[in-house]
Image: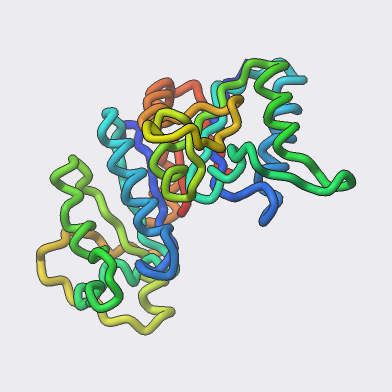
């Protein structure tokens, strides 16, 4: 497997600027040719809830931003299954956002195989 | 010799991350390693404010970063977008006035300055 930067996004989409900061870091890294993978973990799994109504709080929709990642050559998005289960989330994938839900063993492998990690 | 790129995301007063990053720099340099640069992102950009004042008996991160830059030539990069959003402004963002508050030991750059260095797989990225 070629070297990649793993960006771990651990915060809910509108709790702080962290989710957007992670998104912008991913774009910047991809822009200079690094291979980037994204892992949504802990409260970060809320970012892939499709039914976000960000406009009601005057923010940009984080889910839609994630959907745009393939345009920036970022196609590997992973979601931690344990984080989903712990929060009792039911995530329905409408097909607009392509991601893989992975178990804790695969999360560990993803982290171990990465060249660099940034956590937001 | 190992090469390191540091990524600081917390302000100097609200957490100990900046102090830890600085201590890491000092220890690494003392052992003959190289700090390629320290990059400040998110609330870490507050480290670059020239207006920070602390009490005389408190840790002065402003002086420490200035010393690191002056003594060892370590580049202190600040994410331009993150800094502007937080009111840490360098002169080239203020064409209409002389107002600026970025410490001249720091340099305003794009995020790509950090990530471009990571093409060199010998460089280890450490986040504080």
Given residues A62 and A117, the one toward you in this image is A62
The x, y position of residue B124, in whole percent, is 53, 29
Residue A9 visible within the image: yes
The x, y position of residue B93, in whole percent, is 39, 34
- Farthest residue in the left direction? A95
Given residues B86 and B128, the one toward you in this image is B86
Residue A120 to residue B71: above or below: below
Residue A20 to residue B102: above or below: below
Residue at the spot 36% in from the left edge and 61% down from the top edge: A40
Res B117 → quadrant? top left
Is B41 displayed left or right of B105 in the figure? left
Residue B45 to residue A12: above or below: above
The x, y position of residue A33, in whole percent, is 26, 29
Residue at the spot 22% in from the left edge and 57% down from the top edge: A65
Given residues A48 and A4, the one toward you in this image is A48
- Farthest residue in the front direction? B97
Residue B111 visible within the image: no
Residue at the spot 51% in from the left edge and 27% down from the top edge: B107
Is B111 displayed left or right of B46 in the figure? left
Is A92 displayed left or right of B109 in the figure? left
Quadrant location, the N terminus of chain A: top left
Is B101 displayed left or right of B18 in the figure? left
- Farthest residue in the bottom direction? A88
Residue at the spot 30% in from the left edge and 75% down from the top edge: A57
């Amino acid at each position: 497997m070629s070297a990649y930067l793993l960006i771990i996004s651990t915060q809910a989409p509108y709790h702080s600027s962290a989710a957007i900061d992670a998104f912008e870091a991913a774009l910047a890294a991809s822009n200079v040719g690094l291979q980037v993978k994204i892992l949504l973990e802990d409260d970060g799994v809320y970012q892939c809830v499709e039914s976000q109504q960000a406009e009601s709080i005057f923010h940009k929709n984080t889910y839609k931003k994630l959907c745009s990642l393939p345009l920036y050559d970022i196609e590997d998005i992973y979601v931690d299954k344990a984080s989903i289960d712990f929060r009792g989330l039911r995530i329905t994938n409408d097909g607009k956002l392509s991601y893989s839900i992975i178990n804790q063993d695969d999360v560990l492998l993803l982290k171990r195989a990465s060249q660099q990690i940034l956590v937001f | 010799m190992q090469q390191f790129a540091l990524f600081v995301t917390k302000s100097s007063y609200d957490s100990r991350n900046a102090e830890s990053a600085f201590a890491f720099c000092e220890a690494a340099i003392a052992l003959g390693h190289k700090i390629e640069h320290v990059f400040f992102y998110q609330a870490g950009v507050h480290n670059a404010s020239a207006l920070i004042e602390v009490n005389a008996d408190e840790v002065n991160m402003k002086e420490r970063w200035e010393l690191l830059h002056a003594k060892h030539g370590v580049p202190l990069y600040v994410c331009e977008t993150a800094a502007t959003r937080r009111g840490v402004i360098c002169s080239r963002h203020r064409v209409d006035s002389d107002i600026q508050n970025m410490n001249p030991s720091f340099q305003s750059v794009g995020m790509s300055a950090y990530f471009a260095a990571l093409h060199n797989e010998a460089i280890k990225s450490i986040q504080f």
